[in-house]
Amino acid sequence: MRFPVAAALGLTALVPLMVFPVEGQSRRPASPPPARGRAVPRAEAAAPFKVGETLTYDVSWSSILVAGTAIVSVKEKKTSFNSTAHYIVAEGRPLPLVARLYSLYYKMDALLDSYTLLSQRGSLYAEEGNDRRTATTRFDRPARRVFFEDQSDTTTKLDYVAPPETQDGLSTLYALRTKTFRAGDHVTIPVADSGSLYNLQLTVGGLERVKVPAGDTTAWSIKGSITDTGGQPVWNNIAVWISNDARRLPVKMQADLPVGSFVLALREVR
């Protein structure tokens, strides 16, 4: 967890471990099992986003009003890993004035299974000055394992056991958008990042009026912190605001890091 723009996106992602029902569904007892021998067709999970959706954010850092831009897009839905997945891409760049001082570029992408809303694979490509890094996280759901590869000056490969609900950050941000919320809910979520497991501790607050460049909206406030698997704090004071409408847009995201406070505010929706 070392790249600021990517981190600000990734840390706001929350997995469907939450016990929130899908938007529009009521809480009711499960239906009885189907009659033996009758095939039950798979159904894709309902989602408020679709191919072509593009969200553009202003990225501010500490005292700099706007330091860069982040663009998150649903590029396509395609056959992937014996299933179907939403292919989602997020890119972050500094403004030209900042880029003159230090060259930065981040690209995250993810394959989010359209049936389970669990990540199939996530990756990060980062440029910081003259440094280049590519990190890929792949999930083997039947084996409950995560396979991680980091390519920079050297190549590192790791694999480890992970809880079945573990996600990468970008995928879980989009899975979050399919959920409804209840004020006061608390949840702990496993997140795979940079070859390690973390626990995301979340609290759902109430509805708030949020002002961003794209306009004013009513949004759910979800705040939390991150610890390692030993319970040691990694990041505190992270938050995401999800609009309380049919599109379930992440209108604002925030993370306080050792190098400063990052805020992503929605500027444009297409």
Image (spheres, rainbow, N blue to C red):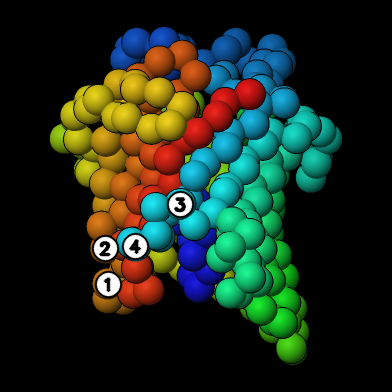
Label 3–label 4 contact, CB within 8 A: no
Instruction: Using the numbered discs, state the Cα–Cα distance from disc 1 to disc 2 in whole angstroms.
Output: 7 Å
Q: Is residue 34 above or below residue 183?
A: above
Q: Mark 3 is on which residue type?
A: Val
Image spot of residue 21 (x, y percent): 38, 23
Numbered-mark total: 4
Q: Is residue 128 above or below residue 29?
A: below
Q: Examine the rendering and report whether any part of residue 105 can be seen.
A: yes
Image spot of residue 13 (x, y percent): 45, 47
Which circle marks residue 66 in the picture? 3
Q: Quadrant of the C terminus?
A: top right
Instruction: Look at the numbered disc 3 and give the secondary structure of its residue.
Output: strand
Q: Earlier in the sequence, mark 4 or mark 1?
A: 4
Location of mark 4 (residue): 62
Q: Quadrant of residue 242?
A: top left
Which circle marks residue 233 in the picture? 1
Location of mark 2 (residue): 236
Instruction: Using the numbered discs, state the Cα–Cα distance from disc 3 to disc 4 in whole angstroms.
Output: 9 Å
Label 1–label 2 contact, CB within 8 A: yes
Residue at the spot x=52%, y=41% of the render?
Answer: 57
Q: Mark 4 is on which residue type?
A: Ser
Q: Mark 1 is on which residue type?
A: Pro
Of all residues, the one furthest to the left in this rendering is 184
Which is in the foreground here, disc 4 or disc 1?
Answer: 4
Instruction: Using the numbered discs, state the Cα–Cα distance from disc 2 to disc 3 in whole angstroms.
Output: 22 Å
Instruction: Look at the numbered disc 1 and give the secondary structure of its residue.
Output: strand
Between 219 and 77, the one lying in front of the other is 219
Q: Examine the rendering and report whether any part of residue 192 can be seen.
A: no
Image spot of residue 104 (x, y percent): 63, 68
Which is in the foreground here, disc 1 or disc 2?
Answer: 2
